[in-house]
Amino acid sequence: MSDNLDSLLSDIQQQCDDAAHDMFGKETSRWHNPTYARTMEKPDTTGEMEGTCGDIIKIFLKIENNTVREASFFTTGCGPSIVSSDMACELSMGKSIDEASEIDGEDILERLGGLPEDKTHCAHLASSALQEALGNWLQKK
């Protein structure tokens, strides 16, 4: 009995993994285990955006010598918001403020390998939160 149940659960897990791969492409692992998902203690700057879908993405940055040294995020959103936020953080790491300010939603979508059409706004929301954080830091200076 338990072998049949284990086999059934394994099949269900595989179907879920296949569906996630279809939705998130090669970056499915970001959904399961995002690298940058955490609330940062004492960030130098933050940016927060709320999408029309109700998702909120908040980006936290530590900046040293005009370079993004640490990035993290928090989101109330769906899987595509998670993977988009995670990629926005990854793309910003080690970049100068000027370089990071050029990261847009299309860059995130390209690095993710795309998202379903009805979820592409998540990449733009993540880039907007990043830009908000960078703009807030520049205003402090």
Image (cartoon, rainbow, N blue to C red):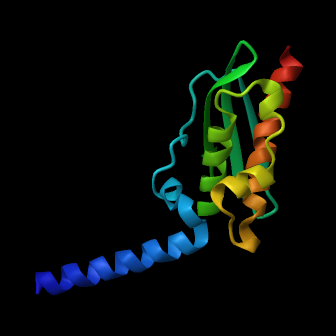
Asked if residue 90 is positioned above or below residue 53 in the image, the reply reads: above
Residue at position x 69%, y 41% from top? 58
Residue 40 lies, with reference to residue 88, above or below; the image says above
How many numbered discs, if any? Answer: 0
- Residue 136 in view of the camera: yes
Can the viewer see residue 78? no
Residue 9 is situated, as x and y percent measured from the top left of the image, at 28, 79
Q: Residue furthest left?
A: 1
Which residue occupies the foreground of this view, 105 or 52?
105
What is the quadrant of residue 59 in the picture? top right
Q: Using residue 126 as the reference point, say whether residue 16 is left or right of it.
A: left
Along the line of sight, which residue is nearer the eye, 22 or 50? 22
Closer-to-camera residue (67/57) = 67
x and y percentages locating residue 137 in the rendered image:
80, 23
**Residue 101 screen position, x and y as percent:** 83, 34
Q: Residue at x 28, y 77 (%)?
A: 10
Query: Left of 35 or right of it: where is 44?
Result: right
Picture coordinates of residue 95 (x, y %)?
A: 71, 28
| Image quadrant containing the N terminus | bottom left
Q: Residue furthest right?
A: 139
Q: Quadrant of the C terminus?
A: top right
